[in-house]
Every structure is written in structure tokens, then in C-alpha cells.
Amino acid sequence: MAENVQTSCGSGTENKDEEVEPKFKYQRLANDLKNILNTDVVTCAAVHYKFLILGTFRGRVHLLDHQGNSVNSNLSNTEHHNHQVAVNQIDVDTKGEFVATCSDDGKVNITGLFSCENNQNLSFGKFIKAVAMDPDFTTHTRRFIVGENKLILYERNLLKKLKPIELSSVEGNVLTICWHGIFVAWASHLGVRVYDLNQKCSLGLMKWEVPSQERLDHFRCHMRWSNKHTLLIGWVDTIRICVIRKRNLAEASCSNLPGYIVDPVSTFQTTFYICGLAPLTASQLVVLGYRKERSAYFKALRPVLCVIEYKMNSSEEICTDSLTLRGYEEYTVNDYSLGCIIEENRFYIVAPKDIVVASLIETDDRIEWLIKHSKFEESMELVATHGGSVSVLSVARLYINHLLTLKQYEEAAKLCLRVLGNNKSLWEEEVFKFVKCQQLRSVSPYLPTSDDCKLDPHVYEMVLYEFLKFDVNGFLNLIKEWPSQLYDGLAVINAIHDHFRKQHANQMLESLALLYSYQGDYESALRMYLKLQNKDVFDLIKRHKLYEVISKLIIPLIQLDRERAFEILLDKDKIKSELVVHQLEHNKEYLYWYLDSLLKVDSKNIFQNKLVSLYAKYDRKKLLPFLRRSKEYVIQEALVICKQQGFYPEMVYLLGCMGGVEAAEALNIIVHSMNDIELAIDFCKEHDDIDLWNQLINESAKQPEIVSNVLDGIVDYVNPEVVVSRIKIGQTIPNLRESLIKMLWHYSIQEEIFSTAQQIQLKDYFDTHSEAVALQRRGQQVSCKQLCPLCHRPVLMKNSVFNSIVVFKCGHIYHGPCVQGVFFDNPCIECKLRTHDPDDEE
């Protein structure tokens, strides 16, 4: 049937051409049904979870299984259990043991399918359009309801005779009946009512809008109970969802009202006439529709099976399938009906000459459809959620093939990463698909490179070769990112040499440097980096401690980055200074940079003598501070260099260091070559040599303009009289008056300072002397217990010649007679003896 079903989605025009996933799959019933339809026409049907029952235009009632095969039953007795004309309605009890039928021949038949014990045949003598059986027909009093111009309930009394009970009068005729539990719903020419069998009352009338230029009874009313309190009604082009609920306290305040009320919770219209409806989910319906439009030849269009989602008073068509049924062009809206087995989500579209079963698509069917329509993501999600006969991986691999066909290589590569995991064999199979497309570059970022899943080295090499051929920058990035153990490094190195291109020389040289490093050939790696002028060479040296390797590469390293090169070269533990100096001997500028930096970290290095000429050539301002600071150079050699260059300040310093005649030469340079009398005076002050002063004074006699400067500078060093005496009478001396005044003022100050200092000194002397005298005159306490160190008798005795005592400052006390004439002017003998203790001498 699939070829006869067309599917569209929603009501928006923008989606008309979009092919969406169908809700249903369809199957046309055949077998014995085919023979029946060849000679008769179906007018009504009842669907039970055990079987199907069809009523035909010729009054026959057929029992079939769900595949369309005839089932033997009491209905096979055409004489007693069929009608003379078309069957109008069929109803079956819940257990599927009894069938009720009615017809325009005025008969109502209650037939046990496999037992005749409770069969009933009633004749009313007029058209009977509706009949309904008690759903629990076998457990109660065998009740059933017949609809004519009134609603009549039939049940057995104690004598097992049928007793008719009129439930309600009807405006016109009863068009259809639907019974569930204690509630019976029926439709008349005005609308729909619900009857409460317990309270024996109607719950009210729901009037139906009559279509223009039509009569309501020209349309079959379709009703179905989705549960014991929810009634679905579809009539003409309106659907109403009704809930049977108990009245609340406010509503039940009037005792005349029924206990239940019919509450229409949702009402909405459809774009087609309704031929049947059934529940699908809590908020979705399956509706069989008859299109209002006609074909170009004024024929009927295909019926539709529509899934509608409803809310309060609105609805949305989720999907709509157009069905091609046999003879559909000739059918009217009342020729179709919809049966269903709710528990199995199976729906039977019944037409006069055809019956088609619509089943919700199962997982495998959905997967197949999604794959067929290239909806692989939805298919994978469906398999992951609900399972199925195919695996997620199988669908994913089909998806990968599809993406490669569409040349969506990046998406295909990402999908590989997502689904292949650590399956080495699957990865290798999928990678070779990218090889055929020459798109290994797309999959390269997603290839597994961990120890958990490592592919064959040949795979990674193929990727690298493709990058080398088409994308050298990408090739370099992979060399940086991938672990070197993934591939054969020597093979890749050879490939670079074979495909070396000058326009990509930098990338290829850097790749070679990395590959040589991975192989442990660090000298080759260093040479590649140096060719590139790539500063990563310094990280490589430090990381692998390649200090012996760089002994021949010192100059290129300095050329690359002097600062970073010197970080290594200035570390004696890494490379010896002698080796560096030897390599730089022929590059004086680099040697200067190196030795200048070395001086900062090793102020006693043995190469300082070389710095004199280097400073003289490259940075003279550092020369004099170096000469003053360092003692590790030969003065004579330095002096020769300075003389060659005419560096007078440096020459003065060196000559001054040498002293003697050289100092005089230095002073001569200051006076005659540098013409700096202030520096000459400072030089004489620094050395404080009378010969130098005399030399300077003699120069001042020759140059009167410097006399005043000399007078100002010699104060405190040389008697100014010597200078003054050299001045010739009549000689003009600039600023002499000011210099003499300054000199006399200075000497006056000096004299005043000396006088003040002398007065302070004398005052301090007399104050100290007075303090000492007062201290000597101060009394000292003497105890009777103290003994004279010489006679060893108490120092204080009455009526004795020893009443006079001598007290030393150290605290020892003697009898005056004991010390008289012995050592009166000498120190205390006791202290003297302690100082020269014989035991100490021993």
C-alpha cells in the first residue's frame, strides 16, 4: 500500500514540498475479503481486538480475522443472522462473544458468535439506524439499546424475557449510539446527548451547527469513548472533546440537576468532513477525513488520515496522509468509516470496496524510512533511544558514506570521532574512504592518537604525505601536534627531501628540525633551526642540554638572538669561556659583547686585558670606568692603546696610577692637551705630591690666566706665598683680587677655627683636671674589719702608732708607717703583685 499513500505535513504552505517522516504504515486487507468485495459492498464495520465484522449492502454480516480471512461462526448462517437490505450499524461486546446488527429492513439481531443460547431477533417494521450492546453483555442482564424515534433499552427480566424500557424520546430519529459503562451517547437530528443509566436521566443536549444548504442527518455522526469519562465526537467538520464529570457543590445545589455534567473541553473545526476518529495520545487524535474540494472532473478526492493535536479550542495538523482507496472518486462522506484497536495503535480505514490498515510505524520501519530519506541523525537518535534491529554504528557508517558523497568531509570526520570510539579496525576502514576522496586532511584532527587506540603507522604517514603535497602549513602543525611514535620519522624526513619546495622552505625546514629532534639527531635539528633563524633553537638546547653540540655554532646563535645566546654562553657550568672566546676571536664585535657581559657575572675573568682595546673600539664611555674598577689588565698595554687613540682622560688615569715621572706626564697632558686647570688641581690634590704642586705652580707662572685658579686650589695643601712670590711685578693676573680675598678669608676662618678649638680644648682640660682632683679629695669609707695587706693587722686600732692610714684608689688600705718610704709614689703593691703572679708565669 505504500505506493498508494502520499504524505504531507501541517497546514503551512512553506512545508508542502517537504517530505516528512510518516506516522503510519499501510496494508491493504485481501484474502477472503477480496472475494467478498468482488460481489458486495461494505456499509459498516466493527473492529475488535480479536476480529473484524463487516456489514454489507446486501445485508450480509461477515466475521474475518485481522488479515482478511473468513472465520466460521454463527454469522455464517445467512438465513437467521443476516438482513434483507444494507446493514446500518454493528456493535460487539467487550469480550467479543456477541454481535448486534440493525438494518433498514427493520430488524435487530443479537447473535452469539459461537453460541445460540442468547440470540435475539427483533423486528420493528421501520428503518433502524442504530443499535448498541452493553459492553459487559455477558455478565449483566443481556442489555442492548435500539434507536428509532426514541431510545429503548432492552434487558431480560426474571423470566428471561426481554423487557423494553424507554430511556428518552428523540427529536427525529436516533442516528448512532455509543455505549461505555454507565453512559450512553447518541446522536439525533439536533445534536448529541449523553444518558446516565444509573440516574436514569439525560445529561443535556449538545446542539450541532447545521452546515449551510445541508441537513445534519445527511452526515454520519462519529462517536468514540477514549475512556470511561471522555467522549470524542466528530460530525460534519467539527470535533468536540467532552469530559463527563461530577458537578461541584455550587452546581449541585439544585436537587433537580443530574449528578454528572457533560463538559466540552475542546471544540475545533477541520478542513475536511469527518468520516471517523480515534484517540492516539492524551492530546492527539487520528481522524479520517473526506475532502470538501472536488477534482477537475468533479470527482471526489482521496480521503485523508490526519493526526491532529488539540488544545483548549484550537488544533494543529501534525501530519496528513492522502490515501488511494479503490473507487474513492465515486464515494461520499458517509461511505467511509474508521475502526481502531486503541491498545495496538492500529486503525482500519473502511471503504465500500476496500479496507486498509494503518499502523503506527515501528522502530525498524522508522529507521528504514529515515535512512532512505537521508535523515541519519534522527535515525541514530531513534536507535539509541528505542533500539532496533540495526545498530547505531551501522547507521553511522551509512551516514559517513552519505556525507562523503555530498563532499561534506568535515562533518563526516566529526561523525567518525563521535561513533568509532577506540575501534582500530573500524577507524582504518573509514579512513581509507577518505583516501579515495583525497580528503585525509579533513579527518586528520579527529584521528585517534592515544595509547588506547593507535592506528597503523602507515595511516598517519598517508595523512602526512597528503598534507605535504597539498597543505605544507597543515603538515607542520601535525608534526607539532602528533606524538612522534605514531609514524616512521625517517620515512617522513625522506619524503620532505623528495618533495622539498623553495616556496615553502621555512615550513619544511621547521618540520625537518622537529623530526630530527624526535629522532635524537639534535645537531641536524639545530642546523635546521639556524637556517630558519628560528629562536626555538634555544629551547631545544636547554631541553636536551646540547652544550657540547653548540661549540661550533656560537656565532650563528649570537646572530639569531644575542640575549638568549648569552644566557647559555655565560654559564660556565654549561660551556667554558675559553671555548667561546676562541670561537669569537675573529669577530671582535661579538667578542666585545660577550666579554662585556662576562665581566658582569665574573669580575675576575682572565680575559679583561682584551676588553681595553674592545672598549676603545666599540664603547669608549665604558673604558675609563673599567680602568678604574678592574685590576686585571696590563697598565702599560692599556696606556699604549689609549695613546694610539688619543684618549687623554684614560691616559691621565693610567699615568697617575704609575706615579713618579708618569704622574708629571699626566699633569702635563691635563694642562697642555686637555687645558683643564680644575682637573690639574684635583689631580695634584689626589696625589698630594710637592713635586706635582711645584710643576703646577711653575705652569701658573707661565700662564697668568690660571694663577687665580691655582691660588683657589692650593689652599690647605701648599703655602700660597709660594705662588704669590712667583708673580712678576706688573704682571696682569685675571681675578687675582677675588682669589686673594678668598684666600685671606679662608685663612682668617682657619685661624678662628684653631683659636676656638684651642679654647675648647683648654676648657675641657681644666674641667677634667678639676673633676679628677675632686674625685681624689672625696672621702672613702674604711671598715674596722679591713686588714693592712703588709702587716695583716686591722687598719684601725686604738692607741697605736698605726692610726694613720693610706688609701689607694683601687680600694686597698695600708697603715701609713707600713708604706712610708717604701712605695709611697708607686702603685698599690697588692695590685702589682696580682699582676705579676708567679703562678701565672709558671
Image: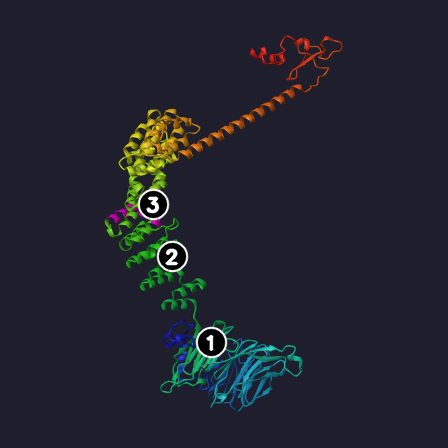
Report the label total.
3
Give the alpha-carbon distance from disc 2 to disc 1, as whole Å: 40 Å
- The type of residue carrying mark 3 is Asp
Helix, strand or loop at mark 3:
helix
Q: Residues within 10 Å of mark 3 (few under 14, many from 20)?
A: some
Q: Say which residue label 3 marks.
A: 536
Q: Is residue 511 left or right of residue 367?
A: left
Q: Is residue 268 left or right of residue 572?
A: right
In the picture, the disc for residue 298 is: none
- The type of residue carrying mark 1 is Glu
Give the alpha-carbon distance from disc 1 to disc 3, as whole Å: 66 Å
Q: Position of residue 398 (x, y in %)?
A: 35, 62
Q: Is residue 622 visible from the viewing direction of this image?
A: yes
Main secondary-structure element of the magenta-colored stretch: helix
Helix, strand or loop at mark 2:
helix
Height in image: 364 above or below 508?
A: below
Q: Position of residue 289 (x, y in %)?
A: 44, 81
Query: Within the image, what quadrant is residue 143 found in?
Result: bottom right
Give the alpha-carbon distance from disc 3 to disc 2, as whole Å: 33 Å
Magenta span: 480-497
Q: Say which residue label 2 marks.
A: 417
- The type of residue carrying mark 2 is Leu
In the picture, the disc for residue 316 is: 1
Q: Position of residue 685 (x, y in %)?
A: 40, 29
